[in-house]
Amino acid sequence: MKIHVGNLSSEITEDDIRQAFEKTGKVDSVTITKNKYNGKLKVFAYVVMDSNEEGKSAIDSLNNQEIKGKILKVSEALTTDTEGPGGKVEGSTKAGFGGGKRGSGAKGEFGGGKGYNSSKGGFGGKKDFSGGRGGRGR
């Protein structure tokens, strides 16, 4: 079972999280997310537990508990089959941000095609933000 752990202290380590969760069962993995640009920790992590029963027990026992000065928010991780911006997005019929095969307007910038989270255009698409075919690329 994959578990989302939110509201983490910036001082917490994967070992701290592992120790807390191992009190309720076997932990397969712990991953604290990091900002890909500066390498700093974000405020959430994912824990994968060996079984659903152990995962539910961990959620019940650790949700709203304090670790390193922060009250944890622990819940089952949401699974999704959609991608983020630039890929297929839930509610979209084509592509994300600006749509089209190039992911942008006719000559660059946001715009054109079907878009982000909309079936009739998104950022610069047919109906939402700037409308039209998008900006002029440079």
Image (cartoon, helix red, strand yellow):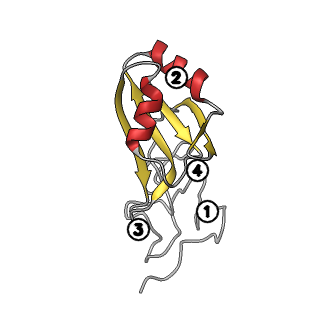
Question: 85 or 11, which is in the foreground?
Answer: 11
- Tell me which numbered mark, 2 or 1, is placed earlier along the sequence: 2
- Residue 123 picture location, percent across and down: 58, 64
Q: Amino acid at mark 2?
A: Ala
Kindly state the secondary structure of the residue where label 4 is placed: loop
- Tell me which numbered mark, 1 or 4, is placed earlier along the sequence: 4
Q: Amino acid at mark 3?
A: Asn
For the residues labelled 2 and 1, the Cα–Cα distance comes to 47 Å
Q: Residue furthest front?
A: 68
- Residue 73 picture location, percent across and down: 61, 37
Q: Amino acid at mark 1?
A: Lys
Q: Residue 85: in sight, yes or no? A: no
Q: Classify residue 40 by image quadrant.
A: bottom left
For the residues labelled 2 and 3, the Cα–Cα distance comes to 31 Å
Mark 1, residue position = 126
The residue shown at (42%, 25%) is: 22
